[in-house]
Amino acid sequence: MGLLMILIGFVIYWIASCFTVKEGWSQQTINDFNEYQNFSDVKVKYNMDILQEQASEKDVRHLIKTGHWKWSDNIKKIYLDSISKNKILNVDPQASLNYAQSIYTEPAVKQTLSFSDETVEGQFLLDGVHDQSGSVFKCIDGQMKQVDFAGYDKFYGNVLTTQKNIKNADIPRKIAGFKFIKGECNPCSALNNNYSCPFSFDEERKNVVEESDLGDYKGSSSSSSAIWKFLWGLPLDYSSLKVPMYNRVANMN
């Protein structure tokens, strides 16, 4: 879903447009940015407080001059690789990259890519996983928790649940297919932009609970998504990515 948002003609970016800010860009830069927005063909509404946390004055000057937010070459390659794997839409990579860069700052596209439908890690963090007993394991309030069905409210029929905190060390023993890559840590920290806890999650094993699966502490990053390897600072072979026409596309902006 994240990548599909990039391809929509009109995108609402964080819903809100606040043009009075306490600190960040200079007032001249804000005025120039507002003027750029008024004449731009890309109709996007930004939350200015968030935008100024993500982009420096140098970044926004680059946008005003070129029509594109500045991305690193590695992020461009990861983006093009993701586009090439999209099974729903077949789009021109140059057009897609140009359009995405006209909307998203680099921090924003990192989040969009990391939580897209194509990343197992992102979907695991957002949605959690069910086990065979019906328990749900998911990140709630920054911590992995086990959620269990506890019946129905006798007056309104609402579903009742219980929540139990799961210690980090117990996560591989509770969730089949989950393994830490470097060591015990809190995988949910990534939801707060803390990328210090690399993990692997084998989606094919999530519903298969075998004694040999559970409790195997150390995993491998070989099957990790490219964007998550990048965020975690793990080795990433960029030559293995599908980056059609990269040399021509990347030099456009």
Image (tube, rainbow, N blue to C red):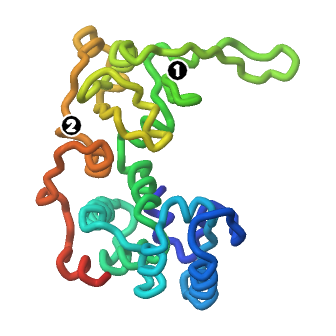
Residue 28, horizontal then vertical, whole percent: 60, 82
Amino acid type at image mark 1: Lys
User: Tag 2's secondary structure?
Assistant: loop
Mark 2 burial class by Cα count in 10 Å: few <14, some 14-19, many 20+: many
Quadrant of image for the C terminus: bottom left
Cα distance in 3D space between marks 1 and 2: 24 Å
| Residue 21 position (above or below residue 10) | above
Query: How many numbered marks are there?
Result: 2
**Residue at which label 1 appears:** 145
Q: Earlier in the sequence, mark 1 or mark 2?
A: 1
**Residue at which label 2 appears:** 221
The residue shown at (46%, 71%) is 7
The residue shown at (36%, 50%) is 118
| Residue 198 position (above or below residue 225) | above
Q: Is residue 245 visible?
A: yes
The residue shown at (36%, 14%) is 169
Q: Quadrant of residue 157?
A: top right
Q: Nearer the viewer, residue 37 or 175?
A: 37
Q: What label sits on residue 107 in the rendered view? A: none
Residue 205, horizontal then vertical, whole percent: 30, 26
Q: Is residue 203 visible?
A: no
* Circles 1 and 2 in contact, beta carbons < 8 Å: no
